[in-house]
Image: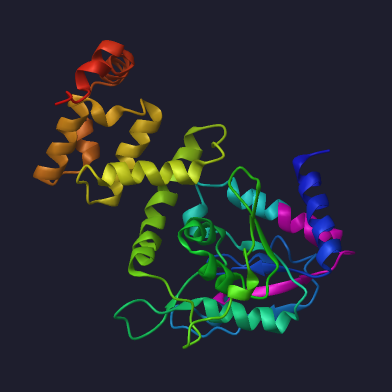
Amino acid sequence: MTSLDVQVRELGEQLSHYGQCYLLIDPYLTEPLEDTLATVADEDRIAIPITHPALTPDQRPRLIRIRASNVELIRASVRESCREQGDPENEVSTGWAIGGWLFTREPAERVARHLAGVMTLRAPSEPRPRYMRWADPRVLAWLWPALDTQQQAQLIGPIDAWWTLTRKPEWAIYEAVDQELSVPSPDGYLRLSAAQWKTAARGENVHALVRAWQLMTEALPADYLARASRLIEQCEAQGLTRASDSQVLALCCLQVHPRLMAHSRIRACIDQARVSDIPLADALASIENPDGWQRIQAELDDPAFVRSTEPVAS
């Protein structure tokens, strides 16, 4: 039995348990109903009634009712999600159209109205709500850990379980700890703090690193998103303000050595990029390839070198 067969079986089991499942489609960049799912997605389609200047009518997310008897749709949706996850080269231009599988006992219209509400968020000091692409699994995976339990419940609302596939691909399952906490704020909007909006802004940089990482490895680790986030934070702590510089340095850490930023040669390049305002990639080009990088790697593996870089206790 292939991994696809296993995932299709697991979805079918959940559908039998909950009785209802809706496939969430995000056609912001790609319309799968005209291509990969066109021949099998003949089930009920429910528009998510969201109106926002950032969206054309064709870009609005929608739900497709999945019936237990439509095994072809279940299989095609899982297969398409796996294909999207495994194509980092085209990800920026095509996006991920499969937003997940929503298990619920509530009517589709209620789920659609709820999603329309949580996809419009008010940011501090902004007169108009922003469009938050919760239908994009990358956005959901990135921001879910940053939400508190009440915010998670507000986001989930009438959905019992929201399943998506990760880049592994493995199941990511989002459920509210207590759905009684799902009462929205007085104005009806899900609210994010200023710190959470900053986290949201960092997501694009972190996912850009993950895409590059995915291209250079056979398999990402299970905690790839958390590790990428920590790496970007460490790179930004070096004073690098350009997203491209943080990504370059983080990739070098992944390729060469996890303690790369401790090496004096690398620190000198970081200082040059920061002070002279040149791209870090240009500064790092002064290191001979491959000899210079291999020498740096060997020094970082040398216990004597490691001790020499550790701070002296006072």
* Residue closest to the far left: 276
Give residue 293's position: percent from left, percent from top: 29, 21
Please report the residue visible at 47 percent of the width from the left and 55 percent of the height from the top.
92
- The answer to whether one can see residue 201 in this image is yes
Residue 313 appears left or right of 291 = left
* Residue closest to the far front: 314
> In front: 211, or 171?
171
Please tell me in which quadrant of the rendered image residue 259 appears. Answer: top left
Give residue 181's position: percent from left, percent from top: 58, 74
- The answer to whether one can see residue 245 in this image is no
Asked whether residue 70 is drawn in magenta, I would say yes
In magenta, the rendered stretch is: 59-78
Number of labels in the image equals 0
Asked whether residue 287 is drawn in magenta, I would say no
Please tell me in which quadrant of the rendered image residue 268 appears. Answer: top left
Q: Is residue 264 above or below residue 241?
A: above
Q: The N terminus appears in which quarter of the rendering?
A: top right
Please report the residue visible at 64 percent of the width from the left and 45 percent of the height from the top.
169
* Residue closest to the far right: 69
Please report the residue visible at 30 percent of the width from the left and 42 percent of the height from the top.
234
Q: Is residue 5 above or below residue 92?
A: above
Give residue 56's position: percent from left, percent from top: 51, 80
Give residue 205's position: percent from left, percent from top: 37, 52
Q: The C terminus appears in which quarter of the rendering?
A: top left
Please report the residue visible at 54 percent of the width from the left and 36 percent of the height from the top.
221
Residue 177 appears left or right of 66 = left
Q: Is residue 108 above or below residue 218?
A: below
Residue 308 appears left or right of 117 = left
Residue 106 appears left or right of 209 = right
> In front: 171, or 303?
303
